[in-house]
Image (tube, rainbow, N blue to C red):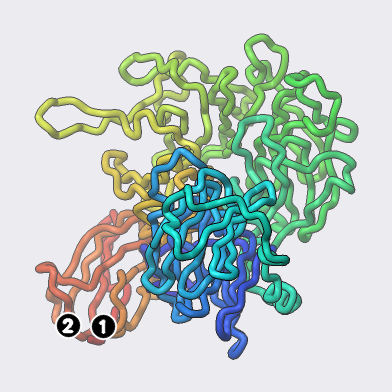
Amino acid sequence: MMFWLIGTWGVIAQTGTWKAYMSYYEPQQIVKGEQYLFVRASNGLYSYNLNDHSITTYDKTTGLTDVTVSLIGWNTQAHRLIVVYDNQQIDLLSTSGTIVNISALANKSLTQDKTVNRIDQQGEYAYLSCNFGIVKVNMQRAEVSESYMLAQPVTATAFAGGNIYARKSDGTALTARLTDNLLDASVWKAATTVPAGLFDENSTDWDTWLETVKTLQPGGPKYNESLFLKYKQERLICCTGTESGAFGNGKKSHIQLFVNNEWISCQDELDSITGHNYVDLATTDFDPTDPQHIFAGGRTGLYEFRNGQFIKEYNYDNSELKTTAAIDHNSKNYTMVQGMTYDGNGNLWLINSGSPTGSLFEINSNGEWISHHHKEFLLSNQSRTYDNVVGLYFDSKGLLWMVNDRFIEPCLLCYDPWNDAVNCYTNIVNQDGTTTGAINSFSSVAEDKNGDIWIGTNIGPFLFEQSQWYEINPYFTQIKIPRNDGSNYADYLLNGIKILSIAVDGGNRKWFGTEDNGVYLISADNMTQIYHFTKDNSQLLSNKVTSIAIDSEKGEVFFATDKGICSYMNDANEPSKEMTKNSVWAFPNPITPDYTGLITITGLSYDSDVKIVTSSGKLVNSGRSNGGMYTWNGLDLKGHQVSSGIYMVIAATNEGKKGTVCKIAIIR
């Protein structure tokens, strides 16, 4: 069970819990079951209670087995909804909310395609028409009863006159007597006649209830596909993102914001306004001096919005931007702005990838374009700017970092605005003097609390320490993790794992999103793997994590995946500069008998020494904060549940200043 708690920041989730932000925007299927309408929308699932008008959304964090729902069907006799996913996992959902998983079809080893094309009900059974035949599911016993291997696609199943019929993809049908051994493919014969209307799909629920469904507001974003995230000023902004490098794959563009627990979409479908494609947005940011003012960039140019409405497009005919020289197109469809960011003064910085004449630009608060072009932004043959410069990031010292995420000359770039100078790092040598020539992708860059720079690559993360910035031949550190097996050997941190995204939390711990290994959380000293979340061992939506953004105040960590956006309530947040009784608080508080989760204390200073004592001064728990947050499981030093009472939280700063910062009431 997830607990949502009311605190200083409003509604916040229990530490250690997950939340999915799924789209329910586009209705695809409506099924009535008793007093409920079950709606498959944008490949998600929700229900509407016709009696009390309540809406319940379902996702992986609330009990569903997987993410992308491909079909649903109601079985009247079993009083259950069958839910089939794109990977052939099957869930059975009752009106009470109980969910039972059937994994037999998903786990079945077949050389043929297992796609489910339709669900038909007959008595207590659901018949799944698949590309290899038919799967018979017992909806009451929650099991696959039989599979009929017909070696050809079946698009629908029906029953008449004691016979079963299987419609094939060419429109003809196979049939057999229900009393036959249907497991024997030879008993299935070509149907010479098929009763009229036998395979007509029942659209009664859709026709009857569609107008009602159109009025419902289950919440969530308009689109699931948001592969780029950024969190600033208590708002999450996201856009389409790209999965296939500089030139994208023609993915429909959108920009969405999550503000005050509500999703807002910027104007989309801009193709008809601009006269060219509006696809493959790669990056977006909002003006720190006016959060309603947004820019976004991608394969087809730079776009400006205000209050969610499109204002202007910048392309080769009205700005300093140029079409890419990598493709022989004098086309607005290839004006590449893959990376951009605002600085703290409201100036927008962007890079024109693939441009034959320009590179880094600054658009100041007056709308003036200032070029910061340098030869270091060009490929070695000087023909054009690097093809896919992404991840523009101002560090705490005002240096602008970025990477070329392209197999053609991947590199790390650093621009110094004060000296108008660029460092380009293409030859990556680690601390042992080993040249890492296997790098063909630099995906991301982030600064940790020590001021060091982390870089994500296709062979794992690298650390660029401050001490190396001004070296003529700098090295990049690959963190060594001792095996502790007596061999005196060590392994590089996340060696060989393709890193797509990096974020640093308030406790100076590093989150690494990967191509196909989920997400890792590494300790502040870089030596310990705290978590490794995958889609199989957690409620992470997918093992492909393209972007990570952190709400540094609440500690919520957002993950962009190829299946949608989800988040994890972290046990670390941004530390407070000063601890007082007014700034430190615990939640939930009081602790009631039905609560079994972690107790969270927040508002602490960095790396605080925390002690929890009884009203008589007996120590029951101690440790150090992660950033400004500390969690307690409600157990004493012996692992026993503490009794009812008032417990004091005593915290000390790194300078040794200490005192009682808050109290926790526990009721057993």
- Residue 243, disc: none
> What's under tag 1, amino acid-wise?
Ile
Residue shown at 38%/47% (left/top)? Answer: 508
User: Looking at the image, is 339 positioned above or below residue 184?
Assistant: above
For residue 485, above or below residue 116: above
Few, some or many C-alpha atoms within 10 Å of disc 1 (few <14, some 14-19, many ≥20)? some
Query: 306 or 92, which lies in front?
Result: 92
Q: Residue at x 76, y 21 (%)?
A: 327
The percent position of residue 277, horizontal first and vertical second, equals 81, 40
Q: Quadrant of the C terminus?
A: bottom left
Task: Return the residue at label 2.
Answer: 643
Q: Give the amino acid at mark 2.
A: Ser
Quarter occupied by residue 468: top left
Residue 30 rendering spot, x and y as whole percentages: 64, 71
Residue contact between numbered discs 1 and 2, judged by CB atoms under 8 Å: yes
Quadrant of res 119 = bottom right
For mark 2, does the 10 Å Cα neighbourhood hold few (<14), some (14 to 19), or many (20 or more) residues? few
- Residue behind mark 1: 666
Q: Nearer the viewer, residue 123 or 393?
A: 123
Q: Position of residue 282 (x, y in %)?
A: 66, 40
Secondary element at image label 2 = loop
Q: Residue shown at 55%/65% (left/top)?
A: 163
Side of 484 where 423 appears, left or right: right
Measuring 30% from the left and 84% from the top, which residue is drawn there? Answer: 592
Going by the image, does 89 lie left or right of 493? right
Picture quadrant where residue 217 is located: bottom right
